[in-house]
Amino acid sequence: MGAGHAHRLYVPGASPVHRLPPQCKLVAVLAFVLLVVATPRERLWAFAGYAALLAAVAVAARVPLRLVLRRVVIEVPFVAFAFLMPFVANGERVRVLGVAVSENGLWGAWNILAKGTLGVVASILLAATTEPRVLLLGIERLRMPQLITQIATFMLRYGDVVTAELARMRVARASRGFEARDLRDAGVLAKSVGALFLRSYERGERVHLAMVSRGYDGRMPVLHDVGATAAQWSLAAALPLTAALVTLAAWSV
Amino acid sequence: MWQLRVPCNCHAYALRLDLPHSTGRTVRDVHVPDGFINAPVSVAAGAVAVAGVAVALRGARRELDDRTAPLAGLTAAFVFAAQMLNFPVASGTSGHLLGGTLAAILVGPYTGVLCVSVVLLMQGLLFADGGLTALGVNIVNMALVTVLVGYGLFRLLLRVLPKSPASVAGASFTAAVVSVPCSAAVFTLVYAVGGTTDVSVGKVAAAMIGVHVLIGIGEALITAVTVSSVLAVRPDLVYGARDLVKPLELRRTGTRDGAPGGTPDRASGPAGDARTPEGPEPSGASA
């Protein structure tokens, strides 16, 4: 796909993590996150272990820590939610710094913060070491219906184009003195959304015609295969297997 | 703060990562993170989501046949972009479009489910927005429920209302205004079964549904005006109101309907008659 620029989320590199086939990384990340979610929240050391595992992956992939931290910002809204938890949750009250808070609420907040952050960091590492296009090939390898991956491919390819169109509409609105202040201005925004839909859909029609004229029959040709060897699978399995040991230990203690 | 701010084309994705989140005032709808819902319920919701998407896959092929991939893909890109459009809800907070009802009315329920699900999948995989284990919960809430409730209500209302553009606008408003709190209600239900925190279900329900009633009004306004503006320009593109489009008739000279002054055949291209003068200029020809 001829997107005009490299993807912002991808950190180019040739580390062992970058070179792993995408389907191996996908399975590893999914298994890892499931194990994290299934861990009892009282085992603080288990979460430290998971964090250490992710840090090891980040080091192996040479993804700068600063970049990971900057992207973790995405979870700010649910951090705010987690901070509310001790005050609204039920259960026994304990005093922390002179404020009565719910003990269950504290555990709940910790639970969301720890598991949510580990999930976000795992996703960030996956996106940083795998090009979106390759990631889609990996999903397809995992028996995801081709139609879904095709739709996702088009979405990624034209996401920038459609977003840029929306941005041009904003500039056009602003240069005519429009500033949305309250809900009554929603009509103007909605007209832009309508125009955006028409332009996107009509672009889709043109893309389809262009594809049909080049022999498209509902299937995409496979240009390069991303098969995985047993060695690559076992390398990728290192993360979830180590995590599984931590989970087992957490449950049995 | 609730207007779209894109510094430059290549920051489009940064926008999703930085702007709505760092302000901390944007109400992120129900993008559930990992660890919020326990593992068994997450897996069960994932199974429901897979079943729903499988049904949608079959239906979408019927709606669009071999045009499915490009058209649904571009519609997914549209939903992705439209979700960046924030609108003010109450003092200080703003919500963003969920787009499930809008997509279902415009491109059909099956394609709508597919588009929103693909957007959620990509947000979870690439943008870490919504947990991977919570993907099933997110798809059930934001794709299946909004489309089922929104589109179902929309068709039901169109059946009883007179066939006019005004009733299409009214029906899409009602459908969207109901679908958003419904999505919040289903989230509360999932939380009641598999929530990991000890906040009482009543409190969660009150907070979630309260906020989403407000978000629903904004969503409904935008949905209704968007559908009407598309209906005015390309009525053939509003899937949910396709039976409102009158078939083009061929007028001949000699019949009573024929124009007197010698423009005999006025049958124009599809939907050509319906173009209104105030429609947006046709988009550029590059694909």
Image (spheres, rainbow, N blue to C red):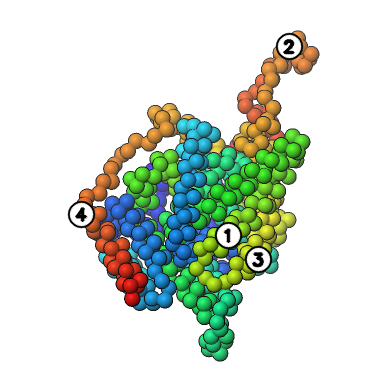
Residue beneath label 1, please? B189
Image point 37% across, 58% down: which residue?
A30
Is residue A160 something one can see in this rendering? no
Q: Report whether B268 appears left or right of A68.
A: right
> Residue A22, image x and y in percent?
32, 52
Can marks 3 and 1 be said to lie on one chain?
Answer: yes
Q: Is residue B49 above or below residue B267?
A: below
Residue beneath label 3, please? B206
Q: In terms of secondary structure, where does tag 2 sit?
A: loop
Image point 69% across, 32% down: which residue?
B244
How many C-alpha atoms fall within 10 Å of the one at disc 1: few (<14), some, or many (≥20)? some
> Residue B179, image x and y in percent?
64, 51
- Which quadrant is home to the N terminus of chain B? bottom right
Q: CA distance from mark 1 to mark 4?
A: 44 Å
Nearest to viewer (mark 3 / mark 1): 1
Can marks 1 and 4 be said to lie on one chain?
Answer: no
Q: Please state the chain letter of the residue tagged with numbered disc 4 in the rendered image.
A: A
Nearest to viewer (mark 3 / mark 4): 3
Residue beneath label 4, please? A231
Can marks 2 and 3 be said to lie on one chain?
Answer: yes
Residue beneath label 2, please? B253
Q: CA distance from mark 3 to mark 4?
A: 52 Å
